[in-house]
Image (cartoon, grey):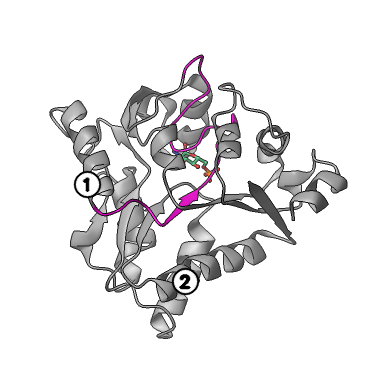
Amino acid sequence: MIRIYKEKDYEAMSRRAANVIAAEIIRKPDCVLGLATGTSPLGLYSELATLNAEGRVDFAGVTTYNLDEYYPIDPANDQSYRYFMNKNLFNNVNVDMDKTHVLFGQAPDWKAECAQYDAEIEALGGIDLQLLGIGVDGHIGFNEPAEVLDPLTHLTDLTEDTIRANSRFFESEADVPRHALTMGIGSILSARRIMLIATGEAKAKAIATVLSGKLTTACPASMLNLHSDVTILCDRAAVSLCDEATIAALS
Ligand code: GLP
């Protein structure tokens, strides 16, 4: 079941999303969080750092697993998702670095890396709250639109659209890695709760497809309709292609 909450802008959405994560940590101080990269979570990560600095949320017992990582990439590269997470969240809160996990972009054996990632998450009892952004083409993590989708953590090829979209962070399009390691759709759906954040008109088509309630591998995020506890937090632009009645029914 999907619920959607429309906030007036990015700041309001980020505050609300940070409060959801903070509430989860307060409810379960040793919770396992699934985390995401991209520009969408930047505001909420900075809100969480503020809440942590004010002593309102304590990350000491929290374990984190990130959705995805480019492959191959050196974790020290400033475009790696490990670097992103350290810079934008982990270095700014009192999380135990040993409890933060990002798929290793230089794993010599990617299959073993993926299998170990899934096994570790399972051994910990699964992810309590999974944060997601959404790609313009409806991808979640790096699960791109395709004829078939992978259930578990795997190596994937990035689509031309994603390479183009993500090239804004690199010096040139040629520098964007062509592959990534990503949790699969099944790994994502195994989380107890899921929160997806989306802002801006570019996401409106993908969000409308998700809210249609149908499943299609052409929009991997539509698979979230299989889950019993999904919250979408968005701004007005991200739901500009959805009618008010649909939004009201899901709020
Ligand atoms: C990347 C990430 C996704 C993210 C998406 C959207 O491709 N792998 O996890 O959700 O981009 O990014 P943004 O939030 O910058 O729009």
Q: Can you tell which mark lies on residue 22?
A: 2
Q: Can you tell which mark lies on residue 120?
A: 1
Q: Residue at x 57, y 47 (%)?
A: 228
Please check the rendered image and state whether residue 96 is part of the magenta-colored stretch, yes or no: no
Name the foreground residue: 228 vs 45.
228
Q: Position of residue 226 (x, y in %)?
A: 56, 37
Q: Residue placed farthest to the left in the image? A: 108
SS for tag 2?
helix
Name the foreground residue: 226 vs 206.
226
The answer to which of marks 1 and 2 sits earlier in the sequence is 2
- Mark 1 and ligand 1: say if the CB distance to the nearest ligand atom is below 8 Å: no
Please check the rendered image and state whether residue 132 is part of the magenta-colored stretch, yes or no: yes
User: Can residue 178 be seen from the camera position used here?
Assistant: no
Q: Is residue 68 above or below residue 40?
A: above
SS for tag 1?
helix
Q: Is residue 128 above or below residue 243?
A: below
Q: CA distance from mark 1 to mark 2?
A: 23 Å
Which residues, given as a range, are shown in magenta? 124-148
Q: Position of residue 227 (x, y in %)?
A: 55, 42
Q: Which is in the foreground here, disc 1 or disc 2?
A: 1
| Residue 2 relative to residue 118: left or right | right
Q: Position of residue 64 (x, y in %)?
A: 32, 57
Q: Main secondary structure of the magenta part?
A: loop
